[in-house]
Image (spheres, grey):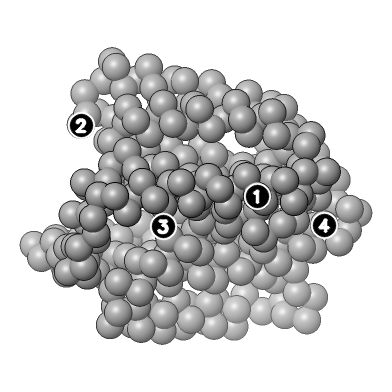
């Protein structure tokens, strides 16, 4: 039986609230450039690290497969193959990334306080609500990015209807799953207005980085540490980072090479970036889904 001994839900919840409020205050104090540097650093550190141990999660969850080299090869091959496919269809890669991320983000947010919650529709609808809210406050930037990637023009009203739809879907999912989620509805109600304020004040990238790092990556790192080592004390979190270090450094080198090669062609580099992002999202979402399933089965 896995001990749920990583940072308690209440402490993590408090950390998220304080971090969000602090981010809003920083927006009033620091310049846009200084904020960008901070958020970029946080994404490079926690954002990349939280997906760097996928190989070990696969091995930990599969008693029949203990070979790191074989697992790594298969994982990388899948990522490169999907990258190639999505690069040929950039709009598809963007849609795929958002839809998969909706489920993945919603899954992590609703299992921060309670690992036993398992509702795909709730996870997806809540993740969609997060993205819809983010996109609504930065709709002109999103329209521009989508057009640069795919030459497809969205209208501004699309984001209003997307937000309304996501709210309705989330409410329906909450009603259906009320008995299972009632213990943390209040916590989620507290978090969402904070996100609205943050998204309305911060830039598109900074808003996404705030959610990606504070609401998603750090809770995921704690949960993964608990899954791999049975607890998440500081020494074990340190061990998690050390284990992920080779993959993290490799990812950073890859990003640097990518920047040096494609930085002069912004549109082309954006296509490659989102294709790669969608490609690594697919196996990572599957890995985390299976990890949570194994955890729930053992509780």
Residue at the (47%, 32%) spot, across then down: 195
Residue beneath label 3, please?
A: 249
Residue at the (75%, 74%) spot, across then down: 62
- Quarter of the image for residue 249 reads bottom left
Q: Is residue 228 left or right of residue 145?
A: right
Q: Secondary structure at mark 3?
A: helix
Badge 4 or badge 3: first in the primary sequence: 3
Q: Nearer the viewer, residue 73 or 274?
A: 274
Q: Position of residue 222 (x, y in %)?
A: 66, 43
Residue beneath label 4, please?
A: 296
Is residue 73 positioned above or below 185 on the image?
below
**Alpha-carbon span between mark 1 and mark 2:** 40 Å
**Alpha-carbon span between mark 1 and mark 3:** 43 Å
Label 1 with label 3: CB-CB less than 8 Å: no
Q: Is residue 128 left or right of residue 84?
A: right
Residue at the (63%, 34%) spot, across then down: 188
Residue beneath label 2, please?
A: 33
Label 3 with label 2: CB-CB less than 8 Å: no
Residue beneath label 1, please?
A: 172
Q: Is residue 138 visible?
A: yes
Badge 2 or badge 4: first in the primary sequence: 2
Badge 3 or badge 2: first in the primary sequence: 2
**Alpha-carbon span between mark 3 and mark 2:** 25 Å
């Amino acid at each position: 039986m896995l001990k749920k001994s990583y940072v308690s839900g209440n402490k993590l919840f408090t950390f998220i609230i304080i971090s969000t409020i602090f981010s809003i205050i920083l927006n009033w104090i620091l310049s846009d450039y200084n904020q960008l540097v901070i958020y970029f650093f946080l994404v490079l550190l926690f954002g990349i690290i939280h997906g760097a141990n996928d190989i070990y999660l696969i091995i930990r969850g599969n008693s029949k497969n203990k070979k790191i080299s074989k697992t790594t090869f298969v994982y990388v091959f899948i990522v490169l193959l999907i990258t190639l496919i999505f690069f040929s269809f950039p709009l598809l890669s963007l849609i795929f990334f958002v839809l998969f991320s909706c489920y993945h983000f919603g899954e992590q947010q609703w299992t921060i306080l309670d690992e036993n919650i398992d509702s795909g529709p709730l996870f997806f609808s809540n993740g969609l609500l997060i993205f819809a809210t983010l996109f609504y406050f930065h709709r002109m930037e999103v329209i521009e990015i989508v057009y640069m990637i795919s030459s497809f023009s969205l209208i501004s009203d699309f984001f209003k209807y997307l937000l309304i739809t996501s709210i309705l879907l989330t409410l329906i999912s909450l009603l259906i799953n009320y008995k299972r989620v009632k213990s943390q509805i209040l916590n989620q109600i507290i978090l969402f207005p904070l996100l609205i304020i943050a998204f309305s004040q911060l830039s598109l990238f900074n808003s996404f980085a705030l959610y990606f790092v504070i609401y998603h990556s750090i809770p995921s790192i704690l949960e993964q540490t608990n899954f791999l080592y049975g607890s998440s004390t500081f020494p074990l979190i340190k061990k998690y980072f050390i284990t992920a270090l080779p993959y993290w450094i490799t990812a950073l080198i890859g990003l640097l090479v990518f920047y040096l090669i494609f930085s002069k062609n912004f549109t082309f580099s954006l296509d490659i970036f989102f294709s790669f992002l969608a490609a690594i999202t697919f196996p990572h979402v599957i890995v985390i889904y299976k990890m949570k399933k194994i955890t729930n089965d053992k509780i």
